[in-house]
Amino acid sequence: MKLSGIKVLDLSQFLPGPHLTLMMSDHGADVIRIESPAGEPTRGIGLTRDGESVWFTNTHRGKRSVVLNLKQPGAVRAFLRLAEAADVIVEAFRPGVVDRLGIGFEAVRALNPGIVYCSIAAFGQTGPYAAKPAHDISIQAETGLLSLNLGQDGQPAMPGLPAADMAGSLMAMNGILMALLRRTQTGRGDYIDISMQDSLASWLVNVVGPVFAEDRAAVAKDERSFGGNAMYNLYRCADGAWLTIGGSEIKFAANLFTALGRAELVELCRLPPGEAQKPARDFLRDTFASESLAHWQGVLQGIDVCWAPVIDLHAALASEQLDERGMRLEFDPTHGGGRSSTQLGIPIKFRDEPGQVVPKTPDMGEHTREVLLEAGLSANAVDALFADGAAIGPTDTRA
């Protein structure tokens, strides 16, 4: 697989870091999850299946778990020993924490000049907000996304996706892979400072027109992507179900309005979004509200236009399309490492050396002894770490 032979030490928690190291694990990297004695929080968050959190299952499959109490000098020394042979380190503490612990980039680079060290933080390592605690919703708020994500009442609504978390995850993975590629040429690693807010802000390219072109705040109901465009909108049907029209190209507008007997409205779709397109929006709103979703599904199937029904997550994850693409995987206890589970598949599909899902997740501290011995610590040294509580195994402090 593409990342076979790459060793990753993952100190992060929750979603951005664990998600990116999951993708690396799926493509062959040896991901060693460094947990604190309290454990990865998502082991206990959300719904469970067969005794394990679904969230944890879908971010920690195929990884190994090592538990170190990095507040103890012995654990720090053990971590640095692991870091000597690592290719990548991912951490998501508040800025400055890893340096205070003695495991920051400079400490690791002194032992391993080829290390690629990635820090993921809400606002990055610099700037006036650097020390400010935040999770996804706060970052979406600070980046302006929630001001555009409005409900039917025109008020900010809870976002359906952790966009800041996922943007940070993908940007971090991009940076890590670029640094690994450059290392093949120079032999040197690098330090990567990922801000989840920066990552999310970089996704705004198609919605910053009002700010950059007209120096004003966006008015969501009038903007192209948020309700002002007749051909990029949500419409309610007579039975209370919803559908989307999602292609604003004029050819699609011509196809739709002509089929619906109102070809003259096509010209309105050439105008700027907002008030100018209101007659076209109103026509589509009233038209779709006159019949059920099933009726419109039959009609729209015969028109070359971008459309989709609004379906729930349960239906979406049972779709033939995602099934054909291997994005929903079922494992019984025999093949799932002792547990039954449903897992999301691998989105990056290589023709050669495709990724492979290893469905088993690690018990907390399951691999502590194994990994420390692999790193060259003696059995006596490992026993001493367990005795001191600097390292923890799967069942007790002495493993």
Image (tube, rainbow, N blue to C red):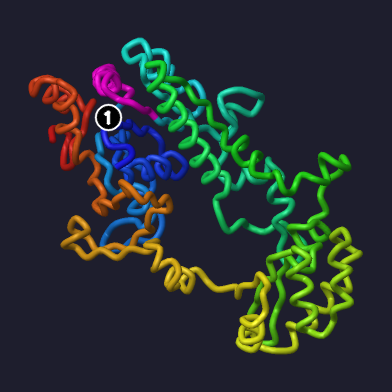
- Residue farthest top in this picture: 110
Viewer-proximal residue among 57 and 206: 206
Is 66 part of what is drawn in magenta?
A: no
Task: Look at the image and tell me whether residue 100 can be seen.
Answer: no
Disc 1 residue crowd, few under 14, some 14–19, many 20+, Cα 10 Å: many
Number of numbered callouts drawn: 1
In the image, residue 16 lies at what x, y percent?
47, 42
Viewer-proximal residue among 387 and 197: 197
Secondary structure of the residue carrying numbered label 1: strand
**Residue ID at (40%, 27%):** 180
Viewer-proximal residue among 259 and 229: 259
The amino acid pointed to by label 1 is Leu
Is 83 part of what is drawn in magenta?
A: yes
Residue 365 appears left or right of 177: left
Residue 85 appears left or right of 370: right
Q: Which image quadrant for residue 237?
A: bottom right
Which residue position is annotated with label 1?
68
In the image, residue 181 lies at what x, y percent?
42, 27
Task: Look at the image and tell me whether residue 33 can be seen.
Answer: yes
For residue 199, above or below residue 278: above
**Residue stretch in magenta:** 70-89
**Residue ID at (81%, 62%):** 228
**Residue ID at (25%, 39%):** 65
Q: Which image quadrant for residue 261?
A: bottom right
Examine the residues drawn in magenta and state their main secondary structure.
helix
